Amino acid sequence: MTDIATVDLYCIDLPADEGAVDATPLVVIHGLLGSADNWRSHLKVWQRSRRVVAVDLRNHGRSPHAEGMAYVTMADDVVALLDKLSIKHAHVLGHSMGGKVAMSLARLAPERVASLVVADIAPVAYEHGHDDVFAALESVREGQPKTRREADELLGEHVDSRPTRLFLATNLVRNDENVMALRVGLDHIKRGYSDIIGLPDGEQPYEGPTLVLRGSDSHYVADDMLPGLREVLPRARVVTLKNAGHWLHADQPEAFQQAVDAFIQAV
């Protein structure tokens, strides 16, 4: 789909529990600055019914760092992983940026997607909104903290929200110099940011079964976006989770898990 070389994505690949009857795997794609690790508690629930694969996108988690954050490029990476894992057909769930990757995958390779779950993102271009986050991560990279407490102090120079700082801290690992270092490809992400906040790739609508989950306290899937969303995802069922923001799977984990399970079982 693109001339940019794919990268060999890291993934968590959990087999279905004994006695599971659904042979179609679930593929989970994280959002910006997230990783497969963020989804471990959810994966344990979903593997009761089916094989579950959670990916680290390029420049995230344990996956390689590489130039190119266009959605067609990231969708190509996921298709290459599916080929490697011999998965011909999967339910695909994506949150935020990962939701746009999932939409792009569904539009560009619909034969690979049994159903689509999009978590708190719409197929629209968003305004710039991560300058403080990028500045916080730059502070950690330049400050070379030796403890997580020191790293949190550096993050706090730019980000007031402690939950957000805790989330960003999942991108820190202790390196050979005993310094808390970034494991994300921050420079590649920053250079690709205009693609990240832009439209998902693909020309045709995805005609397969689709669930869009949004948080009641989030602005990412506003009502005025729904007509455009349905042009891209004509079969979309939109469900709003109460008392949930953009990280709705963390704010309302049980409701999120149950909504995904019920949707997939009905497909």
Image (tube, rainbow, N blue to C red):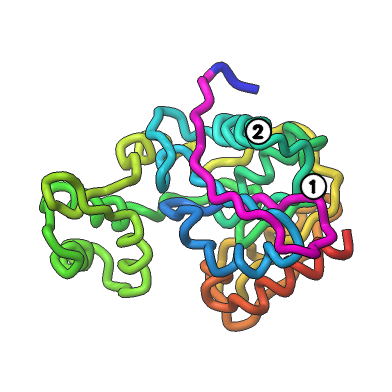
Is 8 placed above or below 213 here? above
Give the CA distance from mark 2 to mark 1: 24 Å
Numbered range of the magenta stretch: 4-28
Image quarter in which the N terminus is found? top right
Q: Is residue 205 visible?
A: yes
Labelled disc at residue 51:
none
Q: Nearer the viewer, residue 159 or 229?
A: 159
Q: Is residue 48 left or right of residue 220?
A: right
Please name the residue shown 71% across and 35% down the image.
86
Q: Is residue 83 located in the magenta-colored stretch of the structure?
A: no
Q: Is residue 228 visible?
A: no
Classed neighbour count for the residue bearing mark 1: other residues with Cα under 10 Å, few (<14), some (14–19), many (≥20): some
Q: Is residue 146 left or right of residue 92?
A: left
Q: Which secondary structure lies at badge 1?
A: helix
Labelled disc at residue 79:
2
Q: Tag count in the figure?
A: 2
- Residue 266 location (% of width, % of height): 88, 64
